[in-house]
Image (spheres, helix red, strand yellow):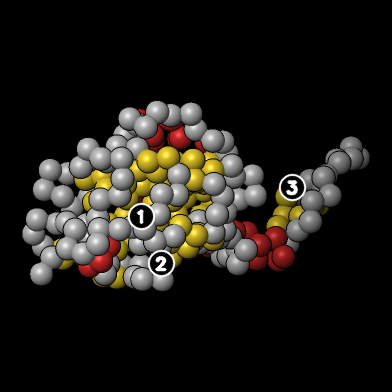
Amino acid sequence: MQSKTVPNFPGYAAKAGIGWKFSTPFTLNWAIFCLWLLSPVPFYSSPLTPPDPFIQNPNSAMKHEFNAVKYDTLLISSQVFDHQGSIPSQYTCDGRNINPPLAIEHIPEEAESLVLIVDDPDAPGGMWVHWVVWNIPITLSIKENSVPGVEGVNDFKRNHYGGPCPPSGTHRYFFKVYALDEVLDLPASTDKKALELAMQPHILAFGEIIGFYKRK
């Protein structure tokens, strides 16, 4: 009788002249695999995976400005306002018009500099840029009323911080911090668009905090 060599795959059994026959363990594994394919939620989870800023914050500026490219996540906070909380008036055009303090965590070890952009997507004419700063030395905090790096031109046509000053209603203000793998060589006449173009290939990590402000 002619013999037939059968691969020794777990869960299979073979009988000469009859062909393949599935054993019970294989049938159970196959059923689990089919359920996994049909399930909209994966059966696994990774507690070591950092939180996705685009899921937690669907309004993230990175979602639309950089085509939702995923970078490492910086944790940005402020001691004077909470994320999606009200910005105190002293940091606006109704007060001292100085920048609020920020705290920065989870900066990658290979980062060489930081960038800070503050803008308002709710302005009547579209995005309004309040502050553009680059070549900020690696630091865990940006102090109140400070010049932490090289300041570019904002939409007030000034090389300095311009606080929230909404003409009507409540506006959102995005304080966005980027960690870069190099120091940028840009003139002080650089605006937000030119800065973003120059820094995009060098971004290692990104984080933001959003504050709200409405004039009385």
Q: CA distance from mark 2 to mark 3?
A: 69 Å
Give the number of the disc on residue 175: 1
**Would residue 39 be seen by someone viewing this image from the given angle?**
no
Q: CA distance from mark 1 to mark 2?
A: 10 Å
Label 1 or label 3, whichever lies nearer to me, is: 1
Helix, strand or loop at label 3? It is: strand
Q: Earlier in the sequence, mark 2 or mark 3?
A: 3
Q: List x then y, in percent, for residue 185.
A: 48, 29
Q: CA distance from mark 1 to mark 3?
A: 67 Å
Q: Earlier in the sequence, mark 1 or mark 2?
A: 2
In percent of the image, x 70 and y 60: which residue is there?
26
Residue that badge 2 annotates: 78
Marks 1 and 2 in Cβ contact (< 8 Å): yes
Give the number of the disc on residue 88: none
Badge 2 crowding class, 10 Å Cα cut-off, few under 14, some 14 to 19, many 20 or more, is: some
Residue that badge 3 annotates: 19
Badge 1 crowding class, 10 Å Cα cut-off, few under 14, some 14 to 19, many 20 or more, is: many
> Left of 18 or right of it: where is 172?
left
Q: Amino acid at mark 2?
A: Ser
